[in-house]
Structure formats: structure tokens, C-alpha cells
Image: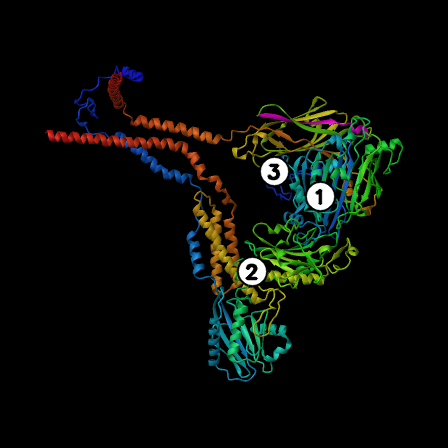
Amino acid sequence: MLAMAEIAGDEAPTPPPPISGEVSTDPYTSTPASTGSNNPPLRTTKPGVKRLILTASVLLSFLVGLPFLLKSTEIHRSPLPSDAITALAHRLHSTPPSFPCGLHAVFLRSVPDRSDASLTRRLEQSISAQLQLLPATSTAGNVSVSVTVESAGGCSSSSSNVDSGWQCGTVTSADLVIGDEVFDELLHSALGSGGGDGSRVYTVVVVEVDDAEGMRIVVGKHRHAWVVGKADEVKAVSVIGKVFAKYFMNGGIEEGEAGIGKGEFMPVGSDGNVVLSFSLLNADPSDWVYDWDFEKIGERMLNPVVEALRPIAEINIESQVLYHTPKSSYSYSDDKLGGNVLSMGDIPFFVNSNEWHLDTSISATGRSKVLQFVVYIPSARECPLYLQLPDGRLSKTNAFISPMWGGVLIWNPPDCSLDSKKTHGTRKKMSSQELMETIEIFIGQLRQLFGLKPSYLSQNMDMPTKFVVSEKGFTEWELDLLYRHHARSNLLSCLTTLESLSSLVRSLPRMIVMDEIGRQVELSLEAANLAQGNATLGISDSSAVYATRARALAEDAFFHPSIMSISYASIEHYFAIYMPFFAPVSLHVLLAAIKELKRYKAERAKYSAFLASQATSS
Amino acid sequence: MAAHSRGHPAMRERGFSPAGTSPYWWIRPCAGSILFLSLLFLFLFTAAAASAAAPEEEKFTEELLLRPLPDRKALAYFHFRSSAPPAASVGRHHHLFPKAISQLVKKYHISELELSFTQGRWNYEQWGGFDPMSTNNAKPPGVELWGFKLNEGNLRYGALPREAVCTENLTPWLKLLPYRDKAGIASLLYRPSIYKGYYHSQKLKLRSSQSLGIILDQTLTVVLQPNTVSGEQLHSNHGQLQPNWSMRHLFNRKLSGKCLVSKSSRVFIEVDKGIVDNVNKSGSDLSWSNEFFVLSNSPDKLIKGQNHVEIQSSFLYVYDASNYTEEKPLDVGITWKLPLVWTCTPSPFHASRFLMGSGNERGSIALSFMSTNLHKQISGSPTDCSIKAVIFQVVPWYVKVYYHSLEIFIDGSRKTVSEVVDKIHVIPSEDKLLPGTLEMLLRFPCSMQSGTLTLDFDRGFLHIDEYPPDANQGFDIPSALVSFPEFSSARSYPEIDPVLGSPLLENFQEDSVVKSYTEVLLVPLTTPDFSMPYNVITFTCTVLALYFGSLLNALRRRIGEEERELKKTVVILKKWQLLASILYRKFVDELF
């Protein structure tokens, strides 16, 4: 009441309130009837648009300026070629990289035979048909088959496009007597440099020997195998098909077995480096201390392996001797077996990561991989220590592998069973013979870690099969297999990384993407395309090299340190900086525009009412 | 005062070789601790000459030296040496030598490196300042690193004065030993005992060359309070017996044999010159059981030590750890029979450093030298002789030192710079790039009792992003290093059998100048209000928004119309008021 009175008092100097019904003197507005009159408010002049235009233009300039502000405050994002990534994904999924290769069957006949083109063509067709029946492998592409039949009468080849480089007349069945290893080399020289660059050609030679009983298969260390024995055509064709599909294409891995092509992982670091770290662990040096001459013997034995695997990985070899490294699982004494026994169930706890300080290698920085190969020398208390297989037998090698980690071999010292007190506190050396045996087991473990069979002893193939062992640890056809799988799995892994990166960048709009990341992605795509191109030509080793590079670059881009800087450009930060200005100002501008628009509409209604009343009154 | 990029040849000959600096830094966190922060780079020093011929195979030795200290404490000094001969397989195949270290040496072409982690400060007055122990093993608090790369004149220096040292630093250090702490002398390293001490300094020093291969010295220096029964310490001051201690008291452990792969494994008990003089004065001989003290075990060997002026200075009792086993462990200790007071030989001057001035703008650093009158003890040198001292100091760039403001006071009177400073070498700091470095060769008169150097500085401002966490605590200036090139702390052991091959004693025999570190300085800098950027943003935006809003209102408001509207509302309100009063009256009427 008081306030009202005051306001009432204040209005004294203002002009008296207008009388009802009168038209206001105001040029713009008419005052509505204030004394309860029902007359609609009228307006005699057109409502002005000055203020409306003013507020609207301010609002508009704000709206126009908004994109400029957003543009000026946006963070740097290098455009990633997501289209190319999707294209690559599409290509890899629709047509997985497959390597075409050739199969050349050679029939060496002892009897003079009429060999004509129809025979070779028939054989070729039946081998092709045989290959269709056998399960295909994931990496094998088209297989082109050719057949050569050589006999005393002559030599005829099917006119196929497979170039195995077979020189007729170089090898005869009489050469078999020189032994398998020499015969293997002889065949290799007979095949010459066929298939050196292009797609791989595998040769299976069927040597017909009349006096042999049954058949015998020998798989050489190059890209050929031979079958010795008396066989009819059907049998020979089926053997050729089996040898090709089972060994040359699948590395002898049976259906359902773990091995190459089954798991996607290769124990190779994403930058293509592998460190093979060999450690000699003296579990309790107070009993005995052993040393080894690894630098001499180990290097000599492992260098061919390193060379052979170079297209897949750059391998470094290191060795060390560690002390006071007890195992962390329990073994129990078994009198029947004459020693301490460690069952299969305890193996997962064998590696004692608290006490085994294996992981010190400066060359294993970044994303390269270390494969640990450990020789464990048990203490006197637990010596001799044996690994027991689930069926109760003792392990022949006394060693086990851990996929992606490495291998462990338990080495019982020769004086183990003797009175340990006699040898107390002396330093001894592993003899070079024992060290060589140890390294052979480790090479077997390395083969296994790469997904191959440690050896083919337990293979059954209906007939005696022999494998010529390569001093490299890996035969040529095995390496082909590794290259193919490596290229394929690396390409897929590169694709996964690139896809993850692209979706990550898309899902985080405030993430800074450096130009370098974009460049690495482009290079990675380029390398992936090259790898795929080489794969279609069947050049497996260079395809593996490019696939490794593609994967390394993709990983480099994904793990680029600048990706971490995302937290410094968060959306909260952005709002905290711009809100204090834009929130109050935009409120003003919006309200002003709305009010002005409303008023203009109301006034225009009044004016049109006035015009209408004028029209009716006139 | 322009900076020279290379040291003066004369200075280099004396062992001080200032060289160019590099703006980058390499460090491998081999001690597990995170070494981020403002590392300081620069140059310096050469090292002592390498010793011994190249060994044929990898070797490991372990040694421990125990010494009673005048202030009732005991010093334990662990010394482990691993050496790898020069071979092609270095960095790849190793038997005893840690693979990680050799790979580090190979990758970064390190020719010398010294990394120390220290907790506590070496007490130069009580624990000595003139012996190899204080010269080589007294290190500044925190982390200090000296590095020297092959085929490169630059030596790099880094210091983290505030780094806390703990077991997490000891574990990776132990991993470099073949047996870690599982056997041998390292098994004495019982963590609660060694971290309870007054001073703890673990050090890793490696040298490598084509002829030597790699030599890695790992040392741990601890000063411990012997854990004795309190009843023995009742008496005060003079006439008080020193506390009796043994290994078990110090470490809570006994030594049960050697590490099997070590070439030699020895324990030394060293008695100081002070004790030796006292015993000699009393006329008794220095056997292991004499008038003043008795050792718990009979030593395998006695070695007399001499300092550089051929004065009998210390006495070593040697125990071979390989003679002891699990069943018969070694627990050597000292039992005092008579009270004994002695002092350790100090360095020629006691150096300390402090800040002067108040406020957050400028101040000065003062370095003071107090004479210990050592020259009188050593030789009755003439009064006009002089003592040389070298000061090496690194100052971070945000403490802007005015090197021209150097003032020198000797015994209270001001001297001109040229009177005292023989040589000076300054590398001025570069903002955010390079710390300032000062190296000075001073010549003090022998008769000087106290000398002070002062340098003025301005406290710089850092960018808001550059302040470390808890910036209000202040910024550390690393310890200054003061060395006395005319004094050598080397010992000689004339009776020692060269076949003994003790790396610990070899180190003691190496010619090294007497040096000491000053305190770390804590400089409080002006720290900004770290929420300031946001405050500024919000405040500015609010002002702008107010201005904008009122401008917009002024443009679009219609004053005349609003006033009429206001009056109209007043009229309407009055009507309502009337209505309300009528209703009220009616209501009141009906009520009564």
C-alpha cells in the first residue's frame, strides 16, 4: 500500500491520463481504453520497423558469426583417409589375400613308355580334380597344375603355364642310391631357379622303382618332395595331392590342431622386431653354479634361423646368466621315476616373475617383442626334475612353451644324482654338446611358437614319410607357409588398427589429430596395398615385408603420443571459456528480438483493425 | 663476461674442463623413480684415471667397510664392482655383468656416468672432509648425475635436489648385482635398518673404454646409529664410552659367507687417524685387541693406510668373507674399553651457502668459507701462502644471477675480484633453455679465517604452465661443489699386496681432489594465483556482456511508451486496491 502511494505521488508531474475513447496523441500507439470500454485498441499510423530491424540484425549477425567462431576455435584434425580404409577393409573381406602357386608333378618312369600329350593332360586333370576334393587352406589361391612324364623314351610336358624349371634327363631313378639328402640337392639343381621371382611352384616327383615294396615319401628342404615306389596312376595322383595339400599348403597341421593359420597371432612385435633372450637360470647357486658359452655356439646355430626369418622379423639374440631364481610351483618326489616330478597342471605357475628378472633388454623398447628362452637348472633338493605328461610318461625334451612368451627347458646337470656336497660352491660350464642339444630344442620351440610342428615324427600318412631337415631350422616350403600367413595376419591386424583409429577419431570430435598421424596412415595404406598386390602375384616374401611395414605404420599412428593430448582440449574447457560471455549476451539478444517481434505483430493488428474500422465507417 | 664455449687449456689440464652444452638430456630411469622436471644441463670435470689392466672375463667383487664415527655413529660402505672385458658381444651376451647396463653404454656411447640417490646430508665436520669417503661418496641430497659421452667433449650434469630416495630406488639397483640381496655382503641390506640411518647414498658409477671394457661400481654409503642397549649411553660427554656395535646391531643381519660368483669378498674395519694417534700415544700397538677397543673376531690381515703426505692415517682390519658359512656366520663388531674422543680431518675450508635479502623480487646468494686451520696442522706453511678453491655452481634460469655483482669479503673486509679470483668461467642462463653455470678458481690467503662471496639475483617469472605442482613450496637451487685442487684425499697402502685386488682400496688410492658440496637452497618465487586465467575470463566476459546488454536495451527501448504503461499499471493497481478495501469492509461487516 505504501509503495503504491509513493508511486502515485511520483506521477504528479506527468500529464493526466488520457480519457476513454480518445485517440492518443502518440504518433505510434493508441492507448487502450482504460476505463472499461470494450472498444478494441486502435492505431492510426503504420507501426515502425526500425527497432525490429535493429534487433533482428544483431541476432542475425550473431548467428552469422557463430560458424566463424566455431571455425576459429576448432582444433587441428588431420583428415584421415577413411574412404580408403573402408575400401581396403572391403577388399580384404571380400577377397582375403591369397597366394597363387603352382604344382608340378613329375613322373620318372623306368620303363620305356610311350609318353604322349594325352597322358600328361589326363594326369593333369586328375590331379586338379584331386586338389578340388582336398580341404582348401585360407591362404592358398589358385593352384595351377602341370605334369611332366619322363621315361627312357622321352620327356613330355603338359603345355601349362607353370614354370618349374624342370630339366629333363637330369635326374634318373638310379640316383636314389646316393641317399635322401644328396638326392634332395640333386633335385634342387634339376629344378634350377624355377619360380624364383613369381609365384611359388612346388614339385612332387614320382620315381617309379620296380623292386621297392610299397611306397615311400620324402619331403625335401626346398620346394619339392618325391615319392618312391611302384604305384599305379590313381594312387600316385592321390599321394601327390595329399603331399601338396597337407604339407606344402598346411605345414602338416591337421584339422582341429593348433598351429599356423589357426590362431591369428604371430610372436612378432608390431614394429617387426623380435628379441630372442636366452637365460640360464641357476635356481640355487649355493648348490652349483653353471655357466655357458652361448656367444659362440648359440650364435653359430641361430644365425641361419635369423637369416631365414628376416622377411618376417628382425631378430636379435641376447643371453644372460641369472642366479637365485627358484621356480614358483611345487614338484613332488617320485621314487618310481627316480626324481622329482612336475605335473602338467603346475606348469602355468612355473615361471616366477618375482625372482626371474628376464625382462631387461634395451632393444626391446617400444612395441617389439621379446621371446624368452629359459634354461632352468634345478637346485640339489629338487634334482633331477622331470616334466610329466598327462598320460603319466615323462616329457622327452623336458621342456614346454608358453605361446607369445617363449619356452622353458629344465636341464638337469650331469652330477645331479651324485652327492651334491662334493661339487659345492664351484662354477662349472655346460658342455658344448649339451648346449647344442639345448639350442636344438629351443629351435623346435621357436618353430612351435611360430605355429609350425616342432617335428614331423608323429605324422601318419598311410605310408612311411621322411623329412629332410634344414640347417636353417625352417625348410623353404615352411618359410613360404610362414610368409603367407604372416602377410595375411599382418594385413588383417593393420586393417583392424586403422579401422579402430578411424572410428576413434570419428567418435571424439575434440581430439587433436596431428598431420603426422595422417601421413602414417597414408603410408600404411600404401604398404598394405603393395602387400596385397604382391600377394595376388604370389610373391610371398616381399608381401610379408610390406605387410609388416603396413602394420608397424598403423600401430605407430595409433599409438602416437599426441593422441594423449585429448584431455587438454575437452569440451568442458571450451564451454568454461565461452559461456561467461555468450550466455548473458545471447539471452539479451534473443529476448529483445522476441519482444520486438511480438510488439510489432500486436501493433500491426491494431493498425489493421483501425484500417478496417476506417473502411467500415467510410 | 662472455661465455666461453671451451675451457681454458690450463684449467683443463688441472682436471677442470668446461665444455659446450647440449640442450637435450638422456637418462634411463634405471632406479625406477620418475625423473621428470627441470633437469639442468651442462658440462664439467674429467674423471680420475682408469685403473688396472683389461680383465679377461666378467668379474664381480663385493666389499664392505665399517668405520666408527666420532659422534657415536657408524659408517657402512658397500662396494660392488662388476666388470665386463671389451668384446664384440658386449650388450648381447653376458654372464655376470648386468645386460641392461652394457646395453645402455652401447646405445648411448657412454664413457663415464655417475648417478647417485642420496637422502640426508653428509656432516663434513663430524664425519670428515679430507678422506676418500667424503670426497667420493658424500653426495648432495636428491639425485645427481654426471655423464660423459664417448668422442664428445661435453659432460652433462643434472640434479634433482628434491627427489625422495626410498626402497623403490634400491630394488632396481640391487637387480644389477648377480645375486641381488640373496647372498653375500648384499644380504646385509635389511631395509628397515639401512633406511633408518642419518645419511643414505646409493651410487652407480660406470666407466667404459675400448681398452677397459665396462667397469661398474655400485656403492652404498650409510651412516647408522648403532642399535645398542640404552643403558650404556647414560653417561654424558667426556668419560663416555663409544657405543659398542657389531654387524648384527647395525643391520639386524649376520654375514653368512660370500657370493659364490664373486672373485673376492671382504669386510674391512677402518679406524681413523684420530683413534690411531690416541692408541699410538698410549704406547700400545694397534692389534685387534688393544687398550682402547677390541674387535669381536681376529682379522685375516692388517693394512696400514697413509695419506698423500705419507703420514700414517688409518688402520684397516681385513676379514675374508669366504671363510665364514651359514653355520659359522661373521658378526664382526667393536667393543670399547676406554672412552675415546677424536675428530676427523676436515677439509681446508668449511663451505656453506645461504640466501640474503627479503621480498619476492630480488635477493643474493652468499657462499661462506670458514677456515678449519688445516694448513697449520699439515705443514707449518708461511703466512703468505695461499689455498686454491674451485667453485662450481649451477643456477636454474628463473633465478637470474647478475654475475657482475660478485663481491668478495675476506675476514670482513671487501676485496676486489681480481685479488681473489684467478679464473672465472660463466655460461649465462638462457630463458627456458639453459641454466646458468659459474665456475671460479679462487685463491684465499692461508691466514684467512672467514671469506664470503655474494652474488645478486632477480627472481624470474615463469609462465603459468611451467610451475610445478606445489609451487608455493619454492624452487631448489642444486648444491654448489667446492673443491680444493691442491689437496688430494688419496690414500696409499704401502704394505698392500697388489695381488689382493681390492677395488675398494683401489678407489681409495685413486688421486682425487678434496671436494665438498654445500647445502641445497630453497628460493621462494612469486607464484601466481593459478585460478587467475579463469577469473580473468569470467570477469572480462561479464563486463562485456553488461555493456552489450545495456547498449542493446538503449537502442530498442521506448522510454515514453514505457512511462505511459507504468502509469496505466498504477491506475489499474489503484482500482484493485479500491476493490480490495470494499471487499475487506464487507467481510468485516459480515463477520461482526
Q: Along the line of sight, which residue is nearer the eye, B163 or B357?
A: B163
The answer to whether residue B9 shows anywhere in this view is no
The extreme left residue here reads: A618
Q: Which residue is mark 1?
A: B218
Name the amino acid, label 3.
Answer: Leu
Query: x, y (%) of residue A339?
Result: 71, 60
Task: Name the quarter where the C terminus of chain A is drawn.
Answer: top left
Q: Residue at x 45, y 50 (%)?
A: A502
In magenta stretch: residue B375? yes
* Gap in angstroms between the C-alphas marked 2 and 1: 42 Å
SS for callout 2 = loop
Task: Tell me the quarter of the picture where residue A449 sits.
Answer: bottom right
Q: Which residue is mark 3?
A: B39
Q: Which residue is mark 2?
A: A311
Query: x, y (%) of residue A491?
Result: 49, 58
Instruction: Look at the numbered discs 3 and 1 and tell me whether their residues touch, using CB distance below 8 Å.
Output: no
For label 3, count other residues whose C-alpha is less than 10 Å away and answer few (under 14), some (14-19) or many (20+).
some
